[in-house]
Amino acid sequence: MTINDVKLIDLPKIIDVRGNLSFAENYNQIPFEIKRTYWLYDVPGGECRGGHAYRETQEFVIALSGAFDVTIDDGRQKKTFTLNRSYYGLYIPKGLWREMENFSTNSIALEFASTKYDENDYIREYDEFLKLKSNGKI
């Protein structure tokens, strides 16, 4: 996978004077079956989350509240996406390094994953990530 496989995906936005509604469904807006859902919140100023890649897991990230940056790295190129609206999400395929930073006050990052939690799926050392990318193993 490369940086070109990462996609910002618009979510349906149903506008209503009582408040807007957006949604995401398996294999529709989210291009995989959701096996795990988690969220990040109360991230202290200046902190970075992520800092890893996955061997198998695909992710879809939505900024439910506030804003933050997601930097994706394919070992050759990096691209930063600012997520700041709850009606679009960032699709991140497996095999890409990701870092999240610049969290605004009260931001909430909702994340959907294509796999259940498995510590062995994580690549936590950047040098190992680069080696696996150069060998074509991820």
Image (spheres, grey):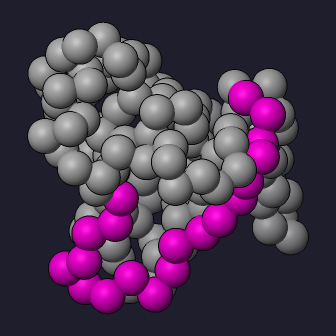
**Along the viewing direction, whichever of 42 and 1 lies nearer the viewer:** 1
Residue drawn 30% across the image and 40% down it: 97
Q: Is residue 55 above or below residue 42?
A: above
User: Relative to 15, does residue 48 appear above or below in the rendering?
Assistant: below
| Quadrant in which the C terminus appears | top left
Q: Quadrant of the N terminus?
A: top left
Name the quadrant containing residue 2: top left
Q: Which residues are magenta?
A: 32-50
**Which of 135 and 111 lies nearest the eye of the viewer?**
135
The one of 75 and 72 positioned closer to us in this rendering: 75
Residue 80 visible to the viewer: no
Q: Is residue 15 magenta?
A: no
Question: Which residue is at a point 30% across and 11% down the rendered structure image?
Answer: 136
Residue drawn at x 65%, y 65% is 38
Q: Left or right? Give the position of 93 relative to 123.
A: right
Inspect this view and state whether residue 30 appears: yes
- Is 134 on the left or on the right of 49, as rendered? left
Return the x and y of residue 119 as percentages of the image width and height: 52, 55
Residue 72 place in picture, x, y as percent = 29, 38
In the image, 114: left or right of 90? Answer: right
